[in-house]
Image (spheres, rainbow, N blue to C red):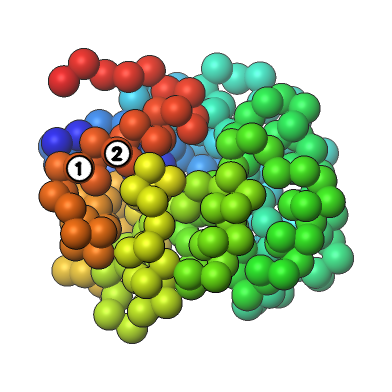
Amino acid sequence: MRWIDNHCHIPPGVDGDAWVDAAREAGVDRMITVGVTTQQSREAIAVAERHDGVWATVGLHPHDATEGTGGLAELLDSPAVVAVGEAGLDYHYDHSPRDVQATAFAEQIRLAHEHDLPLVIHTRDAWDDTFEILDAEGVPRRTVFHCFTGGPAEAEAGLDRGIVISVSGIVTFKNAQDLRDAVARCPLDRLMVETDSPYLAPVPYRGKPNRPAYVVHTGAAVAELQGVDVEAVAESTTAVAERFYGLPSLDV
């Protein structure tokens, strides 16, 4: 089986090299490493340029929205960049004022439109405003809710707008029943899998640092909830990620 970890944060240098090597040994042969500030977006590009099968995104996380999006556009022309984000709203922590988060989110939606790139969304405790801003700006034709934490209603609202759902290790947590219900009902061809490394390690690694290699455990949980073989989840989520990010297909 081959997997794509469509959302992780690979550190630069030898630590990142070890992550990539371990992932490949586990059958995770392609990864998207995600930018959350201008500087970390540059680092993500450098990591992607260092490794075959790794691509980068350029984005400004809502926690860092006060930085402003002015430095992002110049990075989007790199061949290693496959998406804008992660961008969005986070009302759980409110590390940036909500109006500043909203402005940065809207500006990144516009960048996705202008460059015809996918949009990677982070949203937490902010569903109504997230959908309001998306509807006002227009949902980019390739948009994903990364590390989806909603329930069936939020998933349906996203799916109705053409948005893809990306599932993290949270789906292995038995106390995340709303999420598990949403994943069970979501069409398999609208799902991707991710680790969000180094955060949110799935069972059996919960509480430990996460790694891209562990995305296989998330895939297994999705298979159980969907009532299909793990191989079907690997094949489908890989195909969805290839289409979504415009990645080359690999011959098996």
Is residue 126 found left or right of 232 in the rendered image?
right
Q: Can residue 147 be seen in this view?
A: yes
The type of residue carrying mark 2 is: Ser
Query: Which residue occupies 78% across, 61% down?
Result: 132
Residue 34: % across, % down: 51, 43
Q: Do the residues labelled 1 and 2 touch (CB within 8 Å)?
A: yes
The local crowd at label 1, few if under 14, some if 14 to 19, many if 20 or more residues have their Cα within 10 Å, is: some
Residue sticking out furthest to the bottom: 175
> Which residue occupies 63% across, 49% down?
161
Which residue is tagged 2? Answer: 236
Which element is circle 1 on?
A: helix
Pick the residue in front: 110 or 44: 110
Q: Quick one: 237 or 46, which is closer to the camera?
A: 237
Say which mark, if any, is on residue 232.
Answer: 1
- In the rendered image, which quarter contains the C terminus? top left
Residue 64 occupies quadrant: bottom right
Place of residue 193 in the rendered image (x, y in percent of width and height, measured from the top left):
35, 49
Question: On the image, which quarter does residue 54 sit in?
Answer: top left
- Residue 236 to residue 114: above or below: below
User: What residue is at 32 percent from the left and 41 percent from the top?
Assistant: 237
Element on which disc 2 rests:
helix
